[in-house]
Amino acid sequence: MASLQRKPGTGLLLVGHGSTQNPDSSPPTHVHADEIRRRGLFDEVACCFWKEEPSMREARHVFEAREVYVVPNFISEGYFTQTVIPRELELSGPRSTRADGTIWKYCEPAGNHSSMTDLLLRRAREIAPELPEEEISLLIVGHGTGLNDNSAVAAKAQAARIAERSRYAEVISCYMEEPPLVANWDELTTAPNVVVVPFFIADGLHSYQDIPVLLGMESEPTAAASQRAVFRHEPRRLRGRNLYYASAIGTEPGFADVILDLVAAFDDKHGTH
Amino acid sequence: MGRIDELLASALAEGRDCIGQIALRTRSEGGYRLTHRDDVGRDDLRVSQTPESAREIATYDDAGVYRPLKTAPNLRHGWALHLPDLAAVRAALEYFYPAALALWLAERDGRLQPTAMRETLGRQTGMYRVTGLLTDPQAEALVGELCAQTRCLRAMRWTKTPGGERIASLPATKFDPEHDPAGAGARVMPLLCAEMCNLVVAEARPVVKAAQAAAAAAASPAPAAAG
Ligand code: SF4
């Protein structure tokens, strides 16, 4: 994975969604920032959020570095990465030079990147390490709501790549709000074991509360992840199968490497200057 | 040492040892101690030693309820952070009051450029585009309530229109960065508000929607009762 060289004189800004209601939305972004900070690759590493502080507008003042890489901590291209973040950070393209001479480099979101495929594979193996892949149906669950949200496209592409690189009985992308629906998981799959990996950034309302209800694991949404002592223990027997449910892919510690790969991918594509 | 760290050092040297609800003191053993200002004299506090602990402390209030606005005056009590140096203090303050020192430095440098309310509302898209229709009286009522010092400790730097008037429904102290928002007259590092935050923008939406619904109802009165 990431073999990014130290980048003196540069900063890294992670942009997360955040929430005014759910305390579990922003921690993964902070934790990945901690990990990247620990590696000492950038002079400064900061986070900002759409719904929490600091705001994107405020985060523009945080850096003393002359060059800042902006990585949207979002699963896919969509309204936030294409409209909200460029507007709030005043980015005019992949590379923006401000009046004060600082250069802001806007990286792509994680969802389509090949290192995300590695991470999804690792997550799927971790959750059911003792089972042969041939006896597992793997479900990648995205959000999927029509307009200007490409999370469904990204989930589908990742499922196809995983299918090529693994021996799972089947790898299927499904969605909360459009077919194939995750609620029909037992009809979509054939193997005795079903591993479900939420294609989300945080264990927020969707992956921690809504999807378990759609899967039939819970009859009603539970308390937020942080309000519960332990993550659910797997597997559980449901609809005649063994169901394994992972935490959101964005909470995987290896996600920090995906973020660094996005910075490296920016340099590959646009050069370092 | 970066400029923000220098700012923090000079603020402490000037005797500005409070920020928001936090008191910052040096320890006789060396290093620094951060506590809630109400807790300065207590010796029964739960002590943590890493800046990252500030994240969890800042997330919930005394009742364990999530705090969506870090500058709301509902910081939890009962904790102390013992930190070895100013870099660690700065990192912890970044979680308690994100970007506050950076905004203060920008203001001192003359770089802050607050954004007027009309600009903030005017650039919204998607479901918040409608907030551009917020009238001045609606804004006065909404901001007067949500930004009151009992709800948010920041000193407001923005005006209603570029170079125009401030929100009239708030007291003068709300606009004064030297004012101790905790009302204790201490010398503080200011918490600045350079533009209407997303919490207030989000609350503007139902205000506009309700006014639109009321206007629509008035335009098409219900059929008169028979009789
Ligand atoms: S707009 Fe500024 S002063 Fe008002 S609540 Fe938000 S941060 Fe506080």
Image: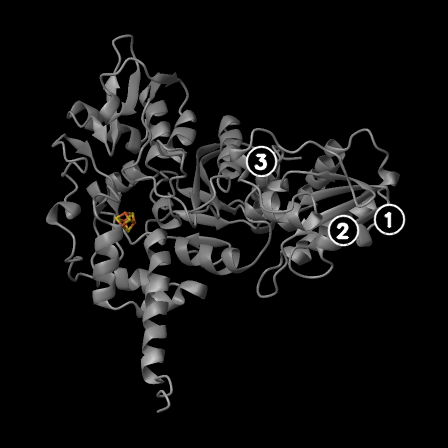
- Residue contact at pointers 3 and 2, CB within 8 angstroms: no
Work out whether A110 lies above or below B161: above
Label 3 SS: helix
Residue A110 in percent (x, y) is at 60, 47
Q: What residue type is disc 3 on?
A: Ala
Label 2 SS: helix
Q: What residue type is disc 1 on?
A: Thr
Residue A15 in percent (x, y) is at 47, 46
Q: What residue type is disc 2 on?
A: Trp
The residue closer to the viewer here, A262 or B115, is B115
Work out whether A49 lies above or below B190: below
The answer to whether any part of residue A265 appears in the image is no
Q: Nearer the viewer, mark 3 or mark 1?
A: 1
Nearer-N-terminus badge (2/1): 2
Would residue B19 appear left or right of B80 to someone viewing this image?
left
Would residue B119 appear left or right of A18 to someone viewing this image?
left
